[in-house]
């Protein structure tokens, strides 16, 4: 898959996929988007000090890196599962240079996220264990009642509709513990209704500064 580097409005970089006419993050600010949707509205919204997190679309590892740093700050222990079908090459990741913008002293941890072996647990820091799955989300069977937070970060439904189906949201709902959270940047009515049909209590929340007007957060209450 061909990808091009672009600079977003907050100075952080993202990738553009010409074949899909789609970006990995918001062009209004990649870093601001990730912090807002996944850290502030997801991680910070869960009260447990030990969390199992699942990311749909591991990609650049930006969300995983922000979670690793936030877990330390909040004195939480995180087991992080990331599924990815099209892993990125190291030269692309170096060009994105996320650690330079976020925390240059932790560069090594960022690259270790990408060097970690697939399909096994790897301790990256005392607070953060990573389990990367090289696989297709649309075909993967996740364990039931295992995760506390899901970062749903697939390409947009118009670009990759097969990632946004009722039966996949039903499976994600089953994979969450009671009190579990799913956050996504996509606030489309059709996605909100699918999440509700799966059983989620869904909130529409304000989007990141300068970015999308609204985002979605689903909570599993029962
Ligand atoms: C919007 S990007 C976000 C990536 C990542 N969360 C980040 O912040 O860089 C969507 C990601 O989903 C991945 N993807 C696409 N189809 C997939 C599939 N069937 N299974 C797993 N991952 C997939 C893409 O390769 C890409 O990394």
Image (cartoon, rainbow, N blue to C red):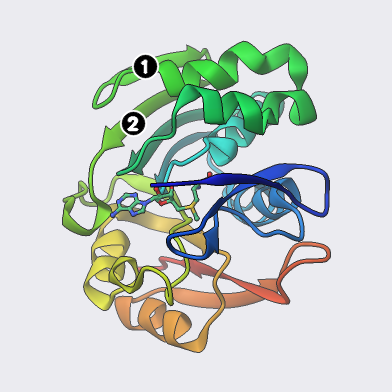
Q: Is mark 2 within 8 Å of ligand 1?
A: no
- The disc label shown at residue 132, or none: 2
* Mark 1 surroundings: few (<14), some (14-19) or many (≥20) residues within 10 A: some
Q: Provide residue 135's location: percent of width, then percent of height.
A: 23, 42
At x 31%, y 18%, the residue is: 117
**Residue shown at the point (37%, 36%) measured from the top left:** 87
Above-or-below relation of 13 to 49? below
Instruction: Specify the label residue 122 is tagged with.
Output: 1
Tag 1 secondary structure? strand
138 displayed left or right of 87: left
Viewer-closest of 84 and 142: 84
Q: Which residue: 40% across, 25% down?
A: 130
Q: Residues within 10 Å of mark 2 (few under 14, many from 20)?
A: many
- The picture places residue 43, in percent across and down from the top left corner, at 59, 46
Query: Which of the two residues, 124 or 72, is positioned nearer the viewer here?
Result: 124
Whether label 1 touches label 2, CB < 8 Å: yes
Q: Quadrant of residue 198?
A: bottom left
Q: Quadrant of residue 196?
A: bottom left
Q: Is residue 65 left or right of residue 209?
A: left
Q: Is residue 148 visible?
A: yes
Up-down: is 30 above or below 73?
A: below
Residue at figure coordinates x 22%, y 72% from the top left: 167
Q: Position of residue 219 (x, y in %)?
A: 47, 66
Badge 2 marks a residue whose secondary structure is strand
Q: Foreground mark, 1 or 2?
A: 2
Compared across the picture, whether 25 is left or right of 115 comes to: right
């Amino acid at each position: 898959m061909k990808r091009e580097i672009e600079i977003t409005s907050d100075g952080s970089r993202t990738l553009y996929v010409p074949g899909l006419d789609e970006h990995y993050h918001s062009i209004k600010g990649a870093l601001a988007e990730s912090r807002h949707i996944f850290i502030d509205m997801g991680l910070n919204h869960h009260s447990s000090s030990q969390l199992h997190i699942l990311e749909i679309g591991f990609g650049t590892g930006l969300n995983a890196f922000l979670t690793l740093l936030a877990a330390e700050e909040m004195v939480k222990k995180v087991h992080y599962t990331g599924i990815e079908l099209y892993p990125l090459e190291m030269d692309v990741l170096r060009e994105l240079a996320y650690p330079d913008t976020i925390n240059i002293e932790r560069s090594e941890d960022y690259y270790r996220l990408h060097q970690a072996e697939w399909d096994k647990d790897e301790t990256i820091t005392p607070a953060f264990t990573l389990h990367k799955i090289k696989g297709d989300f649309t075909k993967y069977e996740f364990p039931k009642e295992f995760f506390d937070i899901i970062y749903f970060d697939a390409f947009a439904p118009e670009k990759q509709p097969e990632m946004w189906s009722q039966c996949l949201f039903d499976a994600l709902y089953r994979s969450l513990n009671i009190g579990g959270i799913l956050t996504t940047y996509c606030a489309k009515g059709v996605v909100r209704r699918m999440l509700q049909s799966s059983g989620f209590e869904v909130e529409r929340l304000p989007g990141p500064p300068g970015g999308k007007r609204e985002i979605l957060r689903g909570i599993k209450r029962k």
